[in-house]
Image: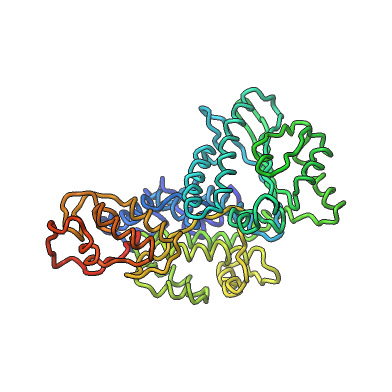
Amino acid sequence: MSSVLKRIRKKSNYRNPEIDHGRDFGLWELEFHKQDRVREYGRNVIRWVAERRVMNNDDLAHVRQLAEAGGVMDGRMLNRIYIDYLTDMGERAPDLCHYHQIPMQLISGELISGGGLNMNESLLKSLEATKIDASLDRRREYGLAREQIQLKQMSEIIQWSSGANFGSMYGFASLCPSGGEIDSETAKINGFKTDRELASIWIYEKSSAGGLVLHALSLEHCTLGRFQRLLDLCGVEHHVSASTMDQLARGINFSSTSVKDLRAMWREILAIDGLSIANDDVEDRVRSRPEAFELYLEFVREIEHSLRKASATRRLNSLLRKTGIKSMVDISMMKRFDAYSAEKVMGFVRSRMIPHYLHGQEIFRDGSTGGVLAISTNAEQRTEAYDSSCPSSSTKVDLNQQHQSHESAMERFINMEILNSQKRKGDCIACGTEKTTVYGCGFCRDCHHSWGKEYLSTGKMLSINEVRQRSKNKKKVQTRSETPNKFRLFSFW
């Protein structure tokens, strides 16, 4: 185990669940020793996990993983979060050119990473989220088309691997599309860094009978023409396509070269063209500052625990106030803590505070988590966040707004999708129909349709009385004193 992870475990009160019988960082026994309260808070998280849709580049991904494990972080989860963190923070470096080796196994026709991740399942989940994104924003259709190609690549790799010799290499190239293919805004919303023309190359090397090593590297300023020059210099017989979309779909036999030679020749090509090479030791920089990961892990833990109890923990409130950021302080003063607040906090931590501490220039670093928090104000004032290389799904907006909504059409559609997914048996709170299917809004199908049609088209949230007046089932209405007059969009909590 690395010294960094040992330090994390020691300072974060990590406990082995096999020894501590499932205690999660000592929190249950300190604050929620009553079993009925534990069950209540557990239900909150279970419901949130079930209702939250699959998302790309989700700020709450690690919070969700912890929630699904019942709040218990074992060594396997800690290692996986750390690996994700290294990659994510490395990709946010302004001077990044990354290279990673990922061991894989071919098991029952599926590619499984060393960390236990099923690549096909991962791509399918991403595709599911991107389909939703594309239905909300047509610019994401370009990204959807590329992901569908990447899913097909898995079948091609598995078929190649079955007959490949040890040491053989086969892969694909995902280049940044030029202005002639799509406009810059469409490229940006799909996660491409057009200013750096950053390309991703995935090379699979046959390492054993059922084993592969995935070499994932990026190349800066990688146009189709420069990529052809690189292949020619390295003796790779492949004619590059006229578009990046077509090239993505075509496999390349890299067996005649090595990853080391590819990277070395790329430096030569950029030097000849008068371009500097990006820093490729950025992961070492992230590893060398474990205090940043300690704080990141603390936010994950405290946010997950806050979602369990539907209000911010004392420690989370303290962390938020110490940032000195008004929006974070405002969240610390709220009585309720929901998924929307969690997204705002983790979004700031992940895209601004932590990467600014890791990659910002002329920052004093004392090696403490307090030092990471101290740079929050400077991170907030930075014009742009440290962008990830992955496109992000749209997130939900505050679902507690009343009557009149000012969300965009995209955001309203997301809210409706959430409500549509929350079906259950019950009585309609508007028309009074009993023992029917009701949605997340508490309305039956007809009333839900009436409310949703107005909300999607105008943003207006009809009151229960207004929905009742439009109902086809008026004769079934029974007045109930406990029924509120105004309908609120229900939050996840």
Q: Nearer the viewer, residue 303 or 236?
A: 236
Vertical relation: 378 (above or below) 186: below
Q: Is residue 349 visible?
A: yes
Q: Nearer the viewer, residue 402 or 359?
A: 402
Residue 199 point in image, percent of width and height: 69, 48
Res 96 quadrant in image? bottom right
Percent coordinates x, y for residue 118 in the rendering: 51, 38
**Colour scheme shown:** rainbow
- Camera-side residue: 364 or 192? 192
Which of these two is toward me, 364 or 161? 161
In the rendered structure, the answer to whether residue 292 lies left or right of residue 232 reads left
| Residue that protrudes farthest toward the top in the picture | 163
Task: Give the left or right position of residue 194, taking residue 379 as reference.
Answer: right
The image quadrant that residue 151 belongs to is top right
* Left or right: 105 in relation to 173: left
The image position of residue 137, as x and y in percent, is 51, 55
